[in-house]
Image (cartoon, rainbow, N blue to C red):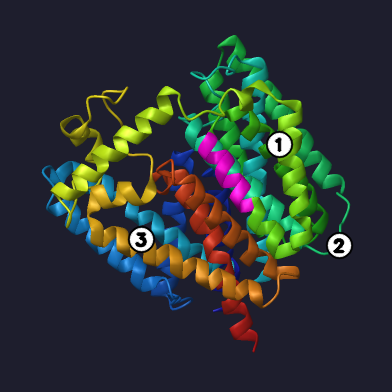
Amino acid sequence: MTADRSTLGRVQAGLVAATGATCLLSIFSAQLALALALAVFVVRLVRGRTRLQRTPLDTPIIVFCVWTLLSAAFSTNPVVAHEDAKKLVLFALFYLALDSAAGGRDRERLMDAVLLGGLVLAGAAILQFHFLGFDTINTRPKSFLGHYMTASGLSMGVLIVAAARLAFTRGWAPPGRSDFQLLAGVGAGLALLTTLQGLGVFGLEAERLFVAGLAVTAVGMIVAREGWPNPGTSTTLAVLAFALSAWSLLLSRTRNAWLGALAGLVVVSVLRSRRTLWLVGAAVAAVFVVRPATVIDRLTLTDESARDRYYMWQAGIDMILDRPVFGQGPGMIVMTYPEYRWPEAPKPSTPHLHDNALQIAAERGIPCAVFWVWLVAAAMADFWRECRRGLAGPGWVAGAALALFTAVMAAGLFEYNFGDSEILMLTLVVASLPYALRRERTANA
């Protein structure tokens, strides 16, 4: 049994770390690592080396998934709807991360891997903005991803996690030689990748190799026995991820991500000390003093994007009134929207309704939206209870989870980020950590 835990268990933890790091850059790589981790977990279950951990989120997750499948079955196009409903398998990541991060060392190294991925995400977006022409409202930096909205939402999440780690971790350790080597390698790799993309030579191939290298590094962070990563690594990654994510967010021109970041930082400040709220206020004031064009030009509610949201929300309400129980079906909004579109809407189509609750209610029915609210509320209540036990040391993950959920929900008032696979995967990884901490505490009691 000991050998199995030290081998298959480490492999599973490494694959979960690779999932957490690469979900910020490549959904294909993240899902491949997730599938491999799930296969290892099943083998360990069969061998009796582990078991499924029960959490207060089990029931809301189950009923949410069941109602989603019912919605798909009763939709006008069940084949398309069930294809979209396959995303439900991503919830397995919550239980895999919970199983893999039961020890404090593994939790910290898992978050090291996530912050390393976030650093790469933000660094690539910054280089795209300044050197590759991704500097207009129609060509915003998207880093390694397919859409700028996903990139900005993930940068928001990384910013909040890094802020929580810096706010609640006591003591600062300097980076070591291995940390400088890692950062030098990442910097050189991003510079080379940007150069190749600018020249139009082997850009895609270089990008794939970079992501593969990140996945291997993430696995190495978990399976390494001694020495590295260490507290200095954690501090260094948090500082750099916070700084670069803040920079990339300002360049992203994405208002919902700004709102989410502000809400998450307020939560971190309140949990740390209400007196630190002035830091958030000072940062906002500094933006208005400097008045960067990427921010000031977006501070309006009369542009086409804002007006289109208003009319698509009206269409969403009509969809709910028309099919309140099972909704239009998962993934069906893009097909049914033209039927419900208001004539005043600027755009003829939309892939989703740019609001989490409205999207879920229109897609899957009012009961499913209620189950989703139950899931979110139960998770945030658990995070708050864990925060009250203390945020020093390992408890920082509870503050990070509460702040991240707040950020995602705030941004989700104007964007369907719950349906974004990459953002959902990051959220599930972080959400598992307070439960892993509780499991460790119970085992040691």
Name the amino acid, label 3.
Answer: Trp
Nearer to us of marks 3 and 1 is 3
Asked which secondary structure carries label 2, the reply is loop
Q: Where is residue 151 in the image (x, y as percent from the top left)?
A: 53, 35
User: What is the number of callouts on the image?
Assistant: 3
Q: Which badge, 3 or 2, is on the more N-terminal residue?
A: 2
Tag 2 residue:
171
The local crowd at label 3, few if under 14, some if 14 to 19, many if 20 or more residues have their Cα within 10 Å, is many
Query: In the current view of this chain or complex, which residue is farthest to the top?
Result: 199
Query: Which residue lies under the disc numbered 1?
Result: 244
Q: Name the residue under label 3.
A: 372
Question: In front: 270, or 145?
Answer: 270
Q: Is residue 296 above or below residue 223?
A: above
Q: Give the range drawn in magenta.
A: 255-264
Relative to 57, 390 lies left or right: right
Q: Label 3: state its secondary structure.
A: helix
The residue sitting at 77% across, 51% down in the picture is 278
